[in-house]
Image (tube, rainbow, N blue to C red):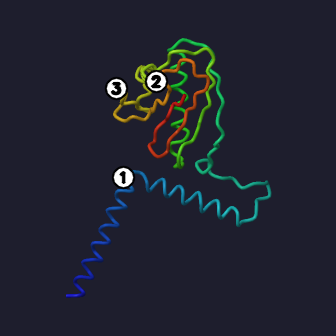
């Protein structure tokens, strides 16, 4: 009887591990974990081995992330033009960072606004809808997909007299936040 109980417990543990691995494969977390393990192991091996004759060893592109913040200036323009630029920077931020498995928030762009007024989340979302951006960056608040990936954290809800806007990627939620 004791042997049977031990076998059953062992089978249950193996089944739970199998289900956990299946969930990791389905959600894509296993791919991210494998990439992080590879990049960490590669970095450790590169530190141990002597450098090649030509200089520094090459590192795979997906193991490198340039965390510099890009400064951008948007001069005066109509609502549609400014909304298109903000939507473009938000999509670029999402594409640049979502596959890298980063922790926390990463600021992609510091945008200095000059003489730009009255731009709201609905203006940016209209651009996403009209130009096919909802496939990349969804905003369920205004009927652009089923997820809310565009977080509008602007004082008063509209860009009126704000001079600096940040576009940040939040890796915990896989969202892009417009902050002003």
Q: Position of residue 92 (x, y in %)?
A: 54, 33
In this image, 52 relative to 37: left or right? right
Q: Can you identify the residue that label 2 sits on?
A: 157
Q: Earlier in the sequence, mark 2 or mark 3?
A: 3
Q: Residue furthest toward the front?
A: 156
Q: Earlier in the sequence, mark 1 or mark 3?
A: 1
Rendered image quadrant of residue 55:
bottom right
Residue drawn at 37 percent across, 61 percent down: 21
Q: Nearer the viewer, residue 93 or 179?
A: 179
Q: Position of residue 111 (x, y in %)?
A: 61, 27
Q: Nearer the viewer, residue 152 or 41?
A: 152
Rendered image quadrant of residue 71:
top right
Q: Are marks 1 and 3 in contact (CB under 8 Å)?
A: no
Q: Can you identify the residue that label 3 sits on?
A: 143
Q: Secondary structure at mark 2?
A: helix
Q: Earlier in the sequence, mark 2 or mark 1?
A: 1
Q: CA distance from mark 2 to mark 1?
A: 37 Å
Looking at the picture, does residue 46 appear above or below residue 66? below
Q: Can you identify the residue that label 1 sits on?
A: 26
Residue drawn at 46 percent across, 29 percent down: 152
Mark 2 neighbour class, 10 Å CA radius: few under 14, some 14 to 19, many 20 or more: some
Q: Position of residue 65 (x, y in %)?
A: 62, 46
Q: Secondary structure at mark 3?
A: loop
Q: Secondary structure at mark 1?
A: helix
Looking at the picture, does residue 50 appear above or below residue 129? below
Q: CA distance from mark 2 to mark 3?
A: 18 Å
Looking at the picture, does residue 121 appear above or below residue 136? above
Task: Assign the C terminus to one quadrant of the image.
Answer: top right
């Amino acid at each position: 009887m004791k042997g049977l109980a031990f076998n059953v417990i062992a089978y249950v543990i193996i089944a739970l591990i199998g289900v956990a691995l299946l969930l990791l494969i389905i959600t894509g977390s296993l791919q991210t974990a494998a990439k992080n393990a590879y990049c960490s192991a590669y970095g450790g091996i590169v530190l141990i081995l002597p450098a090649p004759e030509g200089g520094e060893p090459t590192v795979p592109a997906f193991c490198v992330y340039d965390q510099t913040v890009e400064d951008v200036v948007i001069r005066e323009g109509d609502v549609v033009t400014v909304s298109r630029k903000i939507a473009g920077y938000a999509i670029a931020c999402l594409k640049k960072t979502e596959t890298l498995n980063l922790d926390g928030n990463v600021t992609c762009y510091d945008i200095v606004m000059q003489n730009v007024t009255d731009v709201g989340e609905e203006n940016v979302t209209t651009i996403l809808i009209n130009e096919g951006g909802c496939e990349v960056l969804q905003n369920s608040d205004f009927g652009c997909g089923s997820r809310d990936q565009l977080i509008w954290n602007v004082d008063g809800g509209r860009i009126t007299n704000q001079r600096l806007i940040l576009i940040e990627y939040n890796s915990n939620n896989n969202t892009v936040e417009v902050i002003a």
